[in-house]
Image (spheres, rainbow, N blue to C red):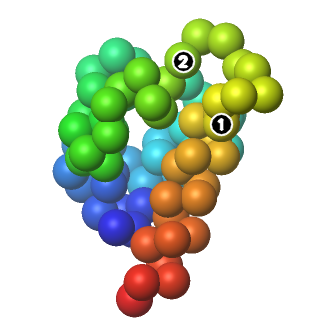
Amino acid sequence: MSQQQLADIVGCSRQTIISIETGKKKPSVEIALKISYALKTPMDQIFFLEESSEKETFCQKISDFFKCSKKSF
């Protein structure tokens, strides 16, 4: 799935997805729920309040997702 495809599913711009991915912007609850649904991943595995060494940050998780998606094409 490309950033544009995710943006289309979520109903936002590609730039919004990029801003969330890079950590420049935090998603609204609605966008977070839609991203979770689109990626078929429980929201608590993507978003969380505290960062720790045991959990990946959202930015890393979404970045890794796009890297894996590009390799599959």
Three-letter code, disc 2? Phe
Question: Which secondary structure, mark 2?
Answer: loop
Mark number displayed over residue 56? 1
Question: What residue sits right under mark 2 in the picture?
Answer: 48
Res 28 → quadrant: top left
**x and y percentages locating residue 37 in the rendered image:** 22, 38
Quick check: 43 left or right of 49? left
- At 42% from the left and 84% from the top, the residue drawn is 72
Q: Quadrant of the image for the N terminus?
A: bottom left
Q: Residue at x 59, y 58 (%)?
A: 64
- Tell me which numbered mark, 2 or 1, is placed earlier along the sequence: 2
* In the image, residue 31 above or below residue 60: above
Mark 2 and mark 1 residues within 8 Å of each other at the beta carbon: no
> Image height check: is 34 above or below 73?
above
Q: Residue 46 appears at what percent x and percent y? A: 47, 32
Under tag 1, what secondary structure?
Answer: loop
Q: Residues within 10 Å of mark 2 (few under 14, many from 20)?
A: few
Q: Residue at x 42, y 61 (%)?
A: 3
Rendered location of residue 4, percent (x, y): 36, 63
- Height in image: 42 above or below 52? below
Residue 19 visible here: no
Q: Nearer the viewer, residue 64 or 33?
A: 64
